[in-house]
């Protein structure tokens, strides 16, 4: 199939190359907002952990007494509804304005004119070059750096499952999963390797070297996602360890469900079923009845889901049957995190 799609990938490469040349060399192609802009993006389609990083950066900015707004395009917004990421941002950051507009320049103007903010965080912004940014952060999934890996193998190291596999090489859409060539990483200011704890050290070092080959000597951080809290429908927060020994099932509709499954297995202390739905699934009452029926079949007393799924499942969840609980996570940044903090501070404060 990849061979059949290769001619279309070559055409796509030409279009992307022409577009990047335009923004690199044509004066006035990019528009500068009147506020500092920090962009979080990636090279591949699918989940790389952008939403947790956006949330973490906004919290860092708030801790420094800044007033950020989030700009997002509202990817896969259902008719008359709200995009998943927007719901997540509202749930995690209720006081932060979230501007939904595919035209990021117009969104930046709206944030400046209608909200009392002093900086902007651009969600999924690496390919949206029309809006200039003061800091470009690019995420790369350590498991699937270029979105195209051979069949994975798992091995246990220190009692933890680790992912080891061999790259089949970067491939652009539609033959692969890359939105643009890896050489575009030269535009990035900081690289973040997510899910770094799920790969062997030798593999992580190899991915780091490959990323720096394309990006140059840019700071590369390793990021891991850790369970943070269980949140019940009544608002009660509990430590994730409360799942130990419980008979639970998981449900998620996310791009990369492997880590969620590993979290539940580790927290519960045993294997458990996880019901997977399509990424950005818009759940219906029929889906909820199906989940409850399957949970009852498994004799589970609790259904655990992600924040992304919670914002859509919780309003539909009945009071009877297995309870619904959300597993919140936090992003832990290692390596050059101090340099990221310094660059974030410099990017915001130099324009204020």
Image (cartoon, rainbow, N blue to C red):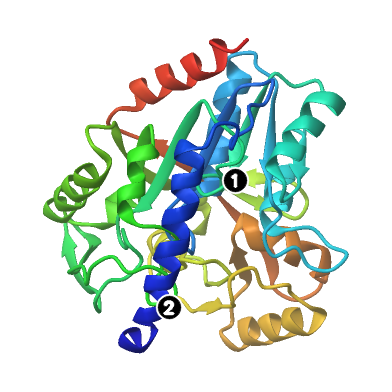
**Residue depicted at x 39% and y 83%:** 5
Q: Mark 2: which secondary structure?
A: helix
User: Which residue bears the numbered disc 1?
Assistant: 238
Secondary structure beneath dot 1 equals strand
Residue 84 picture location, percent across and down: 69, 58
x 19%, y 45%: residue: 213
Q: Quadrant of the N terminus?
A: bottom left
Q: Nearer the viewer, residue 220 or 312?
A: 220
Residue 110 in the image: x percent, y percent? Answer: 81, 33
* 174 lies left or right of 311: left
Q: Callout 1: few (<14), some (14-19), or many (20+) C-alpha neighbours within 10 Å?
A: some
> Can see residue 193?
no
Left or right: 170, with 54 as reference point: left
Rendered image quadrant of residue 60: top right
Query: As drawn, is 141 to the left or to the right of 66?
Result: left
Residue identified by numbered label 2: 8
Residue 277 in view here: yes
Quarter placement of the C terminus: top right
Looking at this view, is 269 or 215 the one in front?
215
Q: Residue at x 60, y 30 (%)?
A: 58
Which sits earlier in the primary sequence, circle 2 or circle 1?
Answer: 2
């Amino acid at each position: 199939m990849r061979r059949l799609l290769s001619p279309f990938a070559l055409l796509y490469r030409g279009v992307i190359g022409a577009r990047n040349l335009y923004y690199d060399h044509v004066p006035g192609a990019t528009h500068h907002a009147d506020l500092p802009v920090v962009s979080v993006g990636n090279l591949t389609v699918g989940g790389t952990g952008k939403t947790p990083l956006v949330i973490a950066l906004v919290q860092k900015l708030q801790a420094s007494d800044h007033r950020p707004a989030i700009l997002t395009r509202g990817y896969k917004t259902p008719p008359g509804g709200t995009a998943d990421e927007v719901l997540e941002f509202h749930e995690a950051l209720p006081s932060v304005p979230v501007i939904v507009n595919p035209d990021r320049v117009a969104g930046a103007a709206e944030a400046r004119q209608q909200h009392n903010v002093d900086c902007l965080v651009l969600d999924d912004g690496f390919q949206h070059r029309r809006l200039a940014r003061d800091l470009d952060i690019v995420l790369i999934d350590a498991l699937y750096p270029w979105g195209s890996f051979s069949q994975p193998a798992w091995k246990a190291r220190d009692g933890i499952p680790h992912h080891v596999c061999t790259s089949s090489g970067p491939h652009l859409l539609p033959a692969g999963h890359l939105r643009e060539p890896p050489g575009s990483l030269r535009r990035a200011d900081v690289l973040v390797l997510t899910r770094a704890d799920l790969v062997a050290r030798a593999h992580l070092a190899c991915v780091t070297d490959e990323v720096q080959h394309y990006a140059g000597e840019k700071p590369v951080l390793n990021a891991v996602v850790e369970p943070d809290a269980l949140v019940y429908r009544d608002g009660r927060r509990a430590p994730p360890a409360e799942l130990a020994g419980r008979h639970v099932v998981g449900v998620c509709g996310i791009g990369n469900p492997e880590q969620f499954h590993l979290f539940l297995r580790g927290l519960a202390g045993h294997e458990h079923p996880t019901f997977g739905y399509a990424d950005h699934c818009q759940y219906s009452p029929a889906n909820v009845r199906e989940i409850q029926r399957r949970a009852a079949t498994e004799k589970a007393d609790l259904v655990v889901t992600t924040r992304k799924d919670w914002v859509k499942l919780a309003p539909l969840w009945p009071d009877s049957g297995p309870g619904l609980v959300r597993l919140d996570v936090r992003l832990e940044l290692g390596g050059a995190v101090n340099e990221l903090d310094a660059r974030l501070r410099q990017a915001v404060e130099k324009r204020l």
